[in-house]
Amino acid sequence: MNEHSAPTGFVGQSIERVEDAGLLTGRGRYIDDLATRRDTAHAAFLRSPHAHAEIRRLDTDRAKVLPGVLAVITGDDIARLTHSLVVGVKADVECWPMARDRVRYVGEPVVLVVAENRYAAEDALDLIDVDYNVLTPVIKPGAALAEDAPVLHPSLGTNLINERSFRYGDPEGAFETTPHRISITTAYPRNSCTPIETYGVIAEFDPCEDAYDVTANFQGPFSIHAVLARALNVPGNRMRLRTPPDSGGSFGIKQGVFPYVVMVAVAARVAGRPVKWIEDRLEHLTASVSATNRETRLEAAVEADGKIVALAWDQIEDCGAHLRAPEPATLYRMHGNMTGAYAIENVSIRNRVVLTNKCPTGLNRGFGGPQVYFPLERLVHKIADTLGLDRLDVIRRNLVPADSFPYRTATGALLDSGDYHAAIDSAVGAGGLDELVERRKAARAEGRLYGIGMVAAVEPSVSNMGYITTVLTPEARAKAGPKNGAQAVATVAIDPLGSVSVKVASVPQGQGHRTVLAQVAADTFGLPMEAIRVNTELDTGRDAWSIASGNYSSRFAPAVAGTAKLAAERVRDRLAAIAASQLNVKADQIEFADGKIFDRGNPQNSVSFSRVAAASHWAPGTVPEGTEQTIRETVFWTPEELTAPTAADEINSSLCHGFIFDFCGVEIDRDTGAVTIDKYVTMHDCGRILHPGMVDGQVRGGFAQAIGASLYEEYAYGTDGAFLTGTLADYLIPTVMEVPEPQILHYESPSPFTPLGAKGVGEGNCMSTPACIANAIADATGIEDLTLPLSPSRISALLAGDEPQPARPHSAPEPSGAAPGGRALTGEGAADVPASRAEVWAMLLDPKTLEAIIPGAHEVEKISDTEFRADVTLGVGPVKGRYRAEISLSDMDEPEAVTLSGKTTGALGSGHGQGRITLSETENGTRVAYRYEAGIDGKVASVGGRLLDGAARVVISQFFQALARQAGGGAGGRWSLRTRLASLFGRRT
């Protein structure tokens, strides 16, 4: 194991975080905390309830005249004032931030309202009428390629927006000559890392300068600045982009805020005032961005001893309704790492990018890694089982040899350093794998389902800008010109009193930027931590930055902190030259420690740091000739190893590569299918560790989110594109109660390519843990076909088959059901009404009575003897909206029975249903019995079945309660207490 001596400075120690005092005492300043101008207006979005529909008519007249409303902006308005957003590949398709002629996913913005406050803006949304012609959606990636699949973008003429094939080595020859061909097919689902803080934008437009000033809680990459300037049709120097001091997490998700920056910026221009928008949780889950879902078929050519000699990848990537930059980054980020931690020389890859009626995708912690390692490591598990080999032996047999680093993979990655075999040996011993095997043996002897999973993975960090251009053919790349490299920016400044400030172009999302940068600067200058002040706010109109700088792809420790070290060292070298002239020694004899600069051979010969550091301010004439100023130094660092893709499509897609080896033991409850993680060991080689406590914190955070991806989290869509997991009641995020304590181990092999020897560590478990847990479940059950998340219901179905549907009561009507993929609701009940059947029948035909008894009704209009139109407001859990309802009566058997049918449409979704009402005489009046079935879709369907089913019962119960009250009042109050109670709660049959 590569051991390092105990740290002599701050770097390498788990010192107290600089950020924590403010955050833990509630003094953090997030975007919603920032002061705004007194005339700042607020925005709200009307969103599509349909996954795919033409917009036939859009009426905003009533919304425009609502008091407090300042502007109502449609997609056509946005188009007049902006350019189409950048599409990830060259294709005949436009990508607007707001829908125009059609909507393509549930939650797509259709109208933007600006008002004096958010309340007025939300109220105005209820007054907008949209007439949709609903179209058939396409949801699954494979189905998008069918010849008869609905096409999302007619100008494109297909849902396949990009396809490329690659060949490295001789994969065909390898498959012909090896004895075994073993394959696996996987479907990786959509999920999201779901930060606590949602999107936020504050925008202002200056008509005198034709310039925008935007504050948004994005994290970069700063390529979005160019995207925004182009979209808003202004030069880059008139698009000022700033960030708040603090952010409530991102995990890649906030990179996707840029379409909202465009819309809110336009809103500020149209309204003539600053405009603020804070996304709510429903909006975030439904329509921000999620990770891509990917269908993969992976085949391996394998020798009898388990040695893999070739891989054949076939990947279909679902990027949702629009291919927004930087997508298809998720598909190509790992292109150089398609062989993982293994030395495999022959590879073929087929990549297809498709569009579906789901929200556009974006970056998500570990982006690309989970989608690659799930099939790859599941395949390695299957190879061992198929050939009757030990799984760990198969992993070891295929690893990159220790003496081959830096190692060039078949697809072009340059793995910088490591000893994968030694790291695994260390993890197996320290993590107690042998003891876990014995535990499995004992559990199985008792008849329990217990399995062990393991995974080896390479974690890339510091992305090469050029990897995304691999989506282009070599000829297209040559025509466009090379794009490659990474760039980090850091500025170190010294004020007239000798205090040191550090500024970087990287927006932190919880990684501890201020602490680590202070450690690096304090060590470089020999100062206490308190002498360093770090500023991580970003202002593109003031700060040094680059299109490739930012906080993404685990680049902070290896790139950003390393660049800060380079900037500090340049200033230190100049300070050393100044001090050497004052101390009458050579510059290479100068040392920095304890706030002093001194002669290494004679520490008493010294001068204070502040005196020398301030010389460029107070006495620039004393600076030795040939020595530059020490006031400020900005360094732009670009590693030479990140070159453009070659003509053979080889790409070193990331600068440095950590190594992960995980193993775990899980037990499965035979009755419930619930998974219990008995033990989880995760070993990381992330190069030089700068702050052990924060490294472990990054590992724990990635592990917790990976537990969610493995066992709980999935963006679920119905076959009609309805989003079914729009609240945290249905999109299940693990809490501290569901996340076990992992055993974290480390192996250090410093990177030769980064200034500090550090590699990334923040994304690794998001890549490794889902496959590790799935392998353990496969080991426990013997089931190969596993799809995430591995929830109890899914595992139970695998173990025992799907539970049969309960027999429907004979008296219940056959359900017409929900729209395909929507929510289907059924129920029945009865209420006693103190009125005759004739009186009740008359009430059901009276619009005034219906207006009084329909929950939330504002107005009921009688269209004909059997048709009514109503305007109602209904709320289900956190979702409340205004709906237009159409009600009709049929199968009328006066006064015995009637069928009520209806449909509703509104901004939050639509619904339809019918119920059969029967009237029978009782001693005290009439018993009204009802059976109903209903279906809903759109945003309201996403609040979850458990809420909706209960809400439907409540609403229908309220209808009959109100009917009973109305009848009771008309009949002179002939109610007994028993009858009142029965009416209140709704007597069930």
Image (spheres, rainbow, N blue to C red):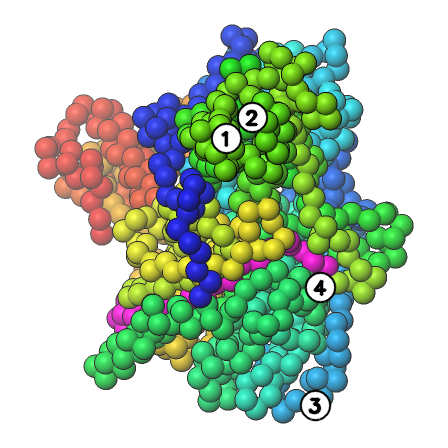
Which of pointers 3 and 4 indicates the residue nearer the eye?
4
Give how far apart the Cα atoms at labels 4 and 1 are. 48 Å
Which of pointers 4 and 1 indicates the residue nearer the eye?
1
Q: Earlier in the sequence, mark 3 or mark 1?
A: 3
Q: Quadrant of residue 253?
A: top right
Q: Residue at x 79, y 55 (%)?
A: 472
Give how far apart the Cα atoms at labels 3 and 2 are. 73 Å
| Residue under pointer 3 | 177
**Tag 1 and tag 2, C-beta contact below 8 Å:** yes
Q: Is residue 950 left or right of residue 901?
A: left
Image location (x, y in percent) of residue 192: 49, 48
Classify mark 2: residues with Cα within 10 Å, few (<14), some (14-19) or many (20+). some
| Residue under pointer 1 | 598
Q: Residue at x 30, y 49 (%)?
A: 736
Which of pointers 4 and 2 indicates the residue nearer the eye?
2
Image location (x, y in percent) of residue 593: 45, 33
Which is more toward the observer, 877 or 988?
877
Residue type of the residue flagged with mark 1: Phe
Secondary structure type for disc 3? helix
Classify mark 4: residues with Cα within 10 Å, few (<14), some (14-19) or many (20+). many
Q: Residue at x 30, y 56 (%)?
A: 741
Numbered label tally: 4
Give the magenta-colored segment's residue range: 651-675
